[in-house]
Amino acid sequence: MGKSQLFCPRAHARHQRKRIDLNTTGHDPRILETAPPLALHWASEEDTAAFAQRLAALPALRHAFIALHGELGAGKTTFVRHLLRALGVAGRIKSPTYAVVEPHETPDGLAVSHFDFYRFSDPQEWEDAGFRDLFAAPGLKLAEWPDKAAALLPAADLHLHLHPAADGTRHAALHAATPLGARIFQELNA
């Protein structure tokens, strides 16, 4: 794969259908109570890249779902680009705003699905496009505008909230919401 491309997994997913229960929250409420968010300040894009490098180095990230929150222009796609580069993805990395999902593969075979639900409006699209199968498959999932598909998404392991400041810097808050998210969070703070 290597390159970003429009992806419709339905053709091959019929033969190896995996199901996930979207009715469960998947998080341990005690984690939310005991782990305050990690507050980050990115003065430059280099700071964003450095954090992405730290995150990419954690083995548990390979199985995570990260929900990215922030207004238009907050830096969600920029963060994803840096994370994908840190994971070794080469070639053009574009926003999936119109395609809804862009698949990527790292040199060591890690499947990464980058979703952008900004234009998502039809829940039937979830089934038709095979998103349920993508979330059930192994690999890293990154979702911009997760609130637009919240009723359909499984619980995110991590929530990254990005807030641009007037001076061009970014404030970020990382929250763990599942046991896997808590493990990644602890590894980041080690």
Image: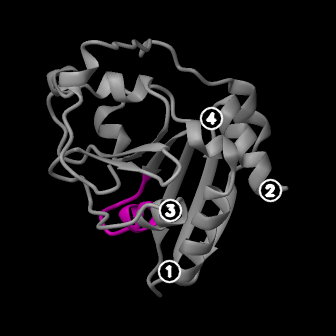
Say which label, 1 or 3, has the lower sequence index.
Answer: 1
Which of label 1 and label 4 is nearer to you? 1
Badge number at residue 137: none
Q: Amino acid at mark 3?
A: Gly
Q: Is residue 74 left or right of residue 169?
A: left
Q: Amino acid at mark 1?
A: Glu
For residue 91, what is the image quadrant?
A: bottom left
CA gap between label 3 and label 4 equals 26 Å
Q: Which residue lies under the disc numbered 2? A: 189
What residue is shown at x 30% (from left), y 33% (from top)?
149
Say which label, 1 or 4, has the lower sequence index.
Answer: 1
Badge number at residue 45: 1
What residue is shown at x 55% (from left), y 82% (from top)?
46
- Asked whether the beta carbons under mark 2 and mark 4 sit within 8 Å of each other, the answer is no
Q: Which residue lies under the disc numbered 3? A: 88
User: Colour mode?
Assistant: one colour
CA gap between label 1 and label 3 equals 18 Å
Which of label 2 and label 4 is nearer to you? 2
Which of label 3 and label 2 is nearer to you? 3
Q: Which residue lies under the disc numbered 4? A: 177
Quadrant where the image shows the C terminus? bottom right
